[in-house]
Amino acid sequence: MDTDILVVGAGPTGLMLANQLARRGLSPLIIDRHAGPARETRALGVQARTLEIYQKLGVVERALELGKIGNGANLWADGKRKGRVPLGDAGRMVTPYPYILILGQDDNERILGDNLGKLGVPIRWNTELVALEQFDDRVRATLKQPDGSTRTIDAAWVAGCDGAHSAVRELNGIAFPGAPYEHVFFVADVAMTGTMVPDEVNVYLWKSGFHLFFPMRGADHWRIVGIVPAELRGRDGLTFDDVVPSVRGEAGSSIAFRSCSWFSTYRIHHRAAARFQDRRCFVLGDAAHIHSPVGAQGMNTGLQDAYNLAWKLALVVAGKADVSLAESYAAERKPIAEWLLQNTDRGFRLIVSDSPLAGLLRTEVLARVAALAMSLKSLQARAFRTVSQTGIEYRGSALSQTLGTLAHDAPQPGDRFPWLKLRLRAGAPIEDLFATLDDAHFHLFAFGANAVPDGMPDFGGLVETHAVPTDPANDAELARVSIPLASTYLVRPDGYIALAGTGVDRAALERYFAERLRVR
Ligand SMILES: Cc1cc2nc3c(=O)[nH]c(=O)nc-3n(C[C@H](O)[C@H](O)[C@H](O)COP(=O)(O)OP(=O)(O)OC[C@H]3O[C@@H](n4cnc5c(N)ncnc54)[C@H](O)[C@@H]3O)c2cc1C
């Protein structure tokens, strides 16, 4: 075998996967057909759940240093500011990162690539996957090398992180049903001044469409996203100057452009792969799902795919778990992609529709209703959880199990374990668990009257146990997130609740590891 895992593609998804595998002691082979890292910004919004993972990876400080924090979004209609959607307040108790970080995809890739280098994994640029053959115990991959020659290698597993035109997906004959949207989009990175609220996202809704303004690093630096005006559709070689009249006409005459450093047009598709796994090959990120940019979910979803698969595949490759554990990647992530596709599609159709009724809805109703709705705390909280991806759950997964009873408002198996600050030992200082607990282990928490089960095995060093003492500060913190005082929670390495309830004893845990995780 030449490698345990061949990662095809060094975009954000492949880089995240390779980082996570390397941290877990594996040496993946990561290839990309391009000559080096992408220089285009492309995706811009880094969501809270991604920042939580960046924290575990040790790169969150760098991301925060390079990015710009967006605390809110302002809604404009027909040139007037109709409302503001605050982000910070709604997520303050949910995550250490209650905002959207505006940080270009190129910077994200640089951060992940540098970290991968530190972990000792080089990226093989100018190397393209051109053929695949699957066997029971391996995949034979043909790679086109930088000098144009081809080489055949054997990999135990292949991860297709190779974007929308994925070779891994196509060579496995996995269908990619869906369709393109009729509209053509433009993106422009511009130095400019105007009516936009500084350092916040500004959404301009118009009868004929929309323009999004994202604040970028540096003074007066904005990313504009919009629809190419109908009269320009189908024209080749469009430049920023061609769309300036529509931006100026819609976002106001007070706009002054100084320069444009990047302009691109693109057509968006909405598609999801029919399968996320074919025997020893997986597809992740854009190779598995593409959708509209509404909500800045695309890049983040790929990063979460990688985080979901990495710990499972690492255990399988190490011989500590059965292959069925890796199969749960597809079972957990495909429904998330489908949900996302449906919802971004719905929102997207409304903001791009050309119909006069939709135009009226956008300018007269949508902006007002959104602004009003967002003044309600409960709706703000729900919107934050959705957009930040902290609300993603795998409750229906075979890896999620409730034992005994668990109140319906308590965090359930399959949910992301909440962000807590607890004293883990009597007399010890209070810790931020997201900052201090590692993601290489399962963590078993026994709260309140529930003791750690007697003679608890650590399943070959996989599980760390915490008998959380009862004291006023701990009890108040647990009550805040509705964790019952007498309960036990087992948290997976990727931060999701595996098992929870009141009836967790040694035998139940052994059964869970043997039957659900298939840990050997
Ligand atoms: C103009 C534009 C603007 C966008 N704006 C946003 C946005 O605002 N928000 C958002 O969330 N998303 C946005 N996106 C989407 C976002 O860029 C993608 O979701 C993200 O890049 C997905 O990452 P990925 O790693 O899965 O795939 P990619 O970034 O596409 O990376 C795939 C990699 O695989 C390599 N590769 C492909 N085939 C092979 C092969 N056969 N062998 C070896 N290597 C191969 C490619 O060279 C590439 O480096 C935008 C996309 C575009 C094009």
Image: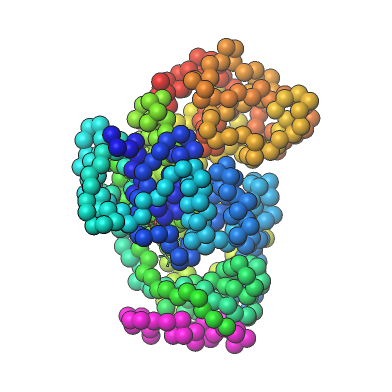
**Quadrant in which residue 497 is drawn:** top right
Q: Residue 326 is drawn in which quadrant?
A: top left
Nearest to the observer: residue 40 or residue 406: 40
Count up the numbered dots: 0
**Residue 6 seen from this side:** yes
Q: Residue at x 36, y 55 (%)?
A: 125
Q: Is residue 253 magenta?
A: yes
User: Where is residue 402 shown, x and y percent of the image?
Assistant: 52, 27
Percent x, y of residue 4: 34, 36
Is residue 365 visible to us here?
no
Q: What span is colored magenta in the figure?
A: 230-257
Residue 490 spot, x, y in % from top left: 55, 28
Which residue is found at the position 49% from the left and 84% from the top? 244
Give the quarter the ligand 1 occupies. bottom left
Q: Nearer the viewer, residue 247 or 366?
A: 247
Indicate whether 480 appears above or below 355. Answer: above
Q: Is residue 267 left or right of residue 439?
A: left
Residue at 45% in and 31% down: 399
Q: Is residue 91 left or right of residue 175?
A: right
Left or right of residue 232: residue 203: right
Residue at point 48%, 52% (across, down) = 113
The image quarter in which residue 72 lies: bottom right
Q: In the rendered view, would you say 519 is above or below 40?
A: above
Q: Is residue 11 above or below residue 79?
A: above
State the quadrant of the C terminus: top left
- Residue lying farthest front? 147
Indicate the quadrant containing the N terminus: top left, top right, bottom left or bottom right.
Answer: top left
Give the percent coordinates (x, y) of residue 160.
33, 48
Left or right: where does residue 229 sit relative to residue 102?
A: left
